[in-house]
Amino acid sequence: MKAISVLGSTGSIGTQTLEIVDAFPDKFRVVALTAGQNLPLLVKQIIRHRPEIVALANESLLPELKDRLNSLSIDQRPKEFLKLTGGPDGLNEAASWNSADLVVTGIVGCAGLLPTLAAIRSGKDLALANKETLIAAGPVVLPELKKSGSRLLPADSEHSAIFQCLQGTPWAENARLSTGIPTPGLRRIQLTASGGAFRDWSTEDLKKATIKDAISHPNWSMGRKITVDSATLMNKGLEVIEAHYLFGIDYDHIEIIIHPQSIIHSMIELSDSSVLAQLGWPDMKLPILYCMSWPHRLNTPWPRLKLTEVQELSFHSPDTSKYPCMELAYSAGRSGGTMPAVLNAANEEAVGQFLNEKTHFLDIPKLIEIACEKHKNELQVNPSLDDILSVDKWARQIVSEQVKKLLF
Ligand code: NAD
Ligand code: MG
């Protein structure tokens, strides 16, 4: 029985993780939950999964959570030993909860950084969905992993595909999980991308893009931020940096390919020119499950892939002029140091401003570019955690000031 902590339990990744726990009650149990503010759902999860600790990001909601739990019937009410906590310290405590074997990081954005570090420092293995953490703080996270021996198992579908393809290669034999060391025998990574909400729109039509348009993903059902990232293709850009840190491969050997059917979840090319791919229906439960069961495979009743039903798998190169975010991400990744943290924070702020109707969809890459340009002369090559947190704050400010100036 593996003990699981779920950070961001009320989100898309969190709820799918709990569905897996439900489907395999003899394999997994939940020991810790953290959430933002969806108290009705969190209470249902507490009743169902009986965790040992629950932490709320928004500490001021703790009294309301306690009231809701106290008003439950006796049989539903959690046992006295349930610890309720909140705020940054509470999230860290839940993330490093002693009885956990694996921490699923489903918090969105750089807000997941400190809890992720707390989990790593306490030696937990991680199922990494919260990619922003690794992108912003790769230079801090990788040495911490080495020190504690924690393993970073990728829950992002593309990186899970790569991870699955790498089983059986020298990479897996040396258990090179997120050491940042180049992978022997790995020549190239091909990250597949669905193309996002606007893949069939012309550049001209993008001027009319609304929030509703941007949050309607053709293939995947996900949280709002990552769905907008998919529409700008920044999600793929972020995943390039994520792949660089996870698999120790340089940026010249990570390629993006548009694959509208989202059946091939990514591919690797090995030194003998063999290309391996992992296929499946677009369903995040499979990569999450693989993190939870690794190195084993569990038997699932999930719909099996029928290629005769899919009929066609197509591929084309991404349009970098329609989607400038990919190039911004490659460039930030190549600069390294604090630059990916600036890119990530500027993107989070720009997407937030877009979702709050303060700026237009097409402004997102422009805002990110401004922040990255301004940071060029301040870049720190070997940043500390404080450096990362400080540039994260700075980049958000730059973007929000730019939006206020209404430069566009
Ligand atoms: P979501 O918005 O559905 O859920 C986010 C969760 O984080 C919620 O539980 C929310 O309460 C919590 N949260 C939000 N702000 C917080 C804060 N400041 N502090 C602490 N907790 C906070 O997001 P999601 O789609 O589940 O994505 C979560 C992460 O997984 C993201 O990093 C995303 O890039 C990654 N990811 C998601 C998918 C997917 O299919 N949803 C796929 C690949 C990767
Ligand atoms: Mg992905």
Image (cartoon, helix red, strand yellow):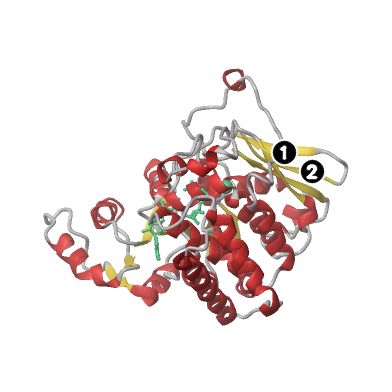
Amino acid bearing label 1? Ser
**Mark number displayed over residue 317:** 1
Residue at x 49%, y 73% (from the top left corner) = 397
Residue 273 spot, x, y in % from top left: 86, 40
Image quarter for ligand 1 equals bottom left
Q: Nearer the viewer, residue 125 or 252?
A: 252
Q: Is residue 323 left or right of residue 381?
A: left
- In the image: residue 385, left or right of residue 330: left
Determine the CA span between mark 2 and mark 1: 17 Å
Residue 123 % position (x, y): 54, 70
51 to the left or right of 337: left
Residue at 64 percent of width and 57 percent of height: 242
Q: Secondary structure at mark 2?
A: strand
Q: Nearer the viewer, residue 170 or 396?
A: 396
Residue at 44% x, 59% y is 352
Instruction: Residue 211: give x, y in percent of width and height.
Output: 42, 46
**Crowding near pointer 1: few (<14 within 10 Å), some, many (20+)?**
few
Q: Amino acid at mark 2?
A: Glu
Residue 180 visible in the current orientation:
yes
Mark 2 or mark 1: which is in front? 1
Query: Eyeballing the image, is 210 above or below 347?
Result: above
- Where is residue 1? Give x, y as percent: 44, 53
Quadrant in the rendering for residue 359: bottom left
Return the residue at label 2.
Answer: 269
**Residue 381 numbered mark, or none:** none
Total tally of numbered discs in the picture: 2
Q: Tell me which label, 2 or 1, sits earlier in the chain.
A: 2
Residue, x 62% and y 19% (percent of image)? 311
